[in-house]
Image (spheres, grey):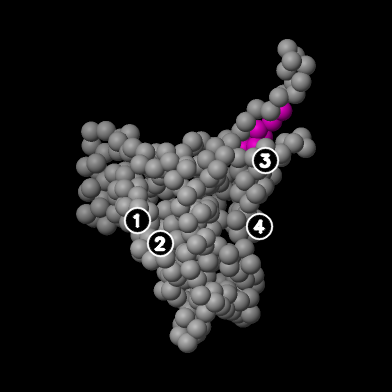
Amino acid sequence: MIVEQSKQIISEVNKAFIGRNDIVEKVLMTIYAGGHVLLEDCPGVGKTTLAVAFSHALGLSNKRIQFTPDTLPSDITGFTVFNRETNHFEYCEGAANCQLLLADEINRTSPKTQSALLEVMEEHTITVDGETHALPAPFICIATQNPLGSAGTQPLPQSQIDRFMVSLSIGYPTLENQMKIINAQRYNNPLQEIRAVTSAQNLLEVQNYLTSVRMTDGVLAYAIRLCEETRSHPLVELGISPRGVAALVKMARASAVLRERNYVVPEDVQNVFLDVCAHRLALRPQARVEGVTAQQVLQEIMRKIKPDQTEV
């Protein structure tokens, strides 16, 4: 059932987002794992289209906020206002009061506004004037940012980057896929043709099912060893946190489910290791001087750390 539902979701998203099924699968895996997605790439490659396509296909209540330098924290969290008729303060909802939040160009706003998402992303609640409001379940944040053109941008703090389960880069499409994209947009907007093929209740059931996917102690130890190695690597200033380890385990379970298995194998961990961990690493200046990237560090660690076949 889950595999068939996943195929339907991917098929609907592909009506508007063409050519990168691997990216679509990983976004869906992140949603199944109950995490948040950071899409980081140059302008015009379909980051926002991908996020909007998922909002349509999943059948979730969704809101979109375009981050700008003058965006305020209250635009995200909402605010209280005094009602003269009732003589009481009333809470007015912000953009985050939904099931799927599209945070477009999240690095275009101030750190003060970015920090308004910290509680929202981790605890799925909003606290305004001392009163806590629970968000509808499931809650998913899909954020986009452009890594190039730093004028007017504010880098995300490490605490917020760590709250994104994965960071994905789409890249430029091939010639054939560009032709398909242009032809698909010839007469209408493909986003308008996407229909909802699931619901919030179905997604919650999938998220609950993921907790029952079996992972042996050997595979779990393998995932932890990979993350621990980043903490002692000579080129890494800040390694993978325990939250990062938990995200890796959840994504590995989601990977197993999409491959029609109810158990996790080391290949599931390897398939998502870079997507889950690369954006969490803070490299030392020496790495930048040598031209070493976070992806290269993680690939080196995967070559060094092998799963214990006797335990798996």
Tag 1–tag 2 contact (CB < 8 Å): yes
Q: Answer yes or no: do the residues labelled 2 and 4 have beta carbons within 8 Å?
A: no
Q: Which residues are magenta?
A: 73-80
Which residue occupies 29% across, 44% down?
Answer: 15
For marks 4 and 3 on the same chain, the one whose residue lies earlier in the sequence = 3
Q: Amino acid at mark 4?
A: Ser
| Disc 1: which residue | 3
Query: Which residue lies under the disc numbered 2?
Result: 257
Residue that mark 3 sits on: 126
| Front position among marks 2 and 4 | 2
**Residue 147 seen by the camera:** no
Tell me how far mark 1 sits from mark 2, CA to CA.
7 Å
Classify 10 Å Cα crowding around label 1: few (below 14), some (14-19), many (20 and above). few
Q: Amino acid at mark 3?
A: Ile
Disc 1, SS: helix
Left or right of 213 in this view: 88: right
Q: Earlier in the sequence, mark 2 or mark 4?
A: 4
Residue located beneath label 4 in the image:
159
Residue 95 in magenta? no
Where residue 298 appears, as percent x and y from the top left, is: 50, 74
Nearer the N terminus, badge 1 or badge 4?
1
Residue 275 point in image, percent of width and height:
47, 64
CA–CA distance between discs 3 and 2?
Answer: 32 Å
On screen, residue 212 above or below 59: below
Judged from the image, the secondary structure of the residue bearing numbered disc 3 is strand
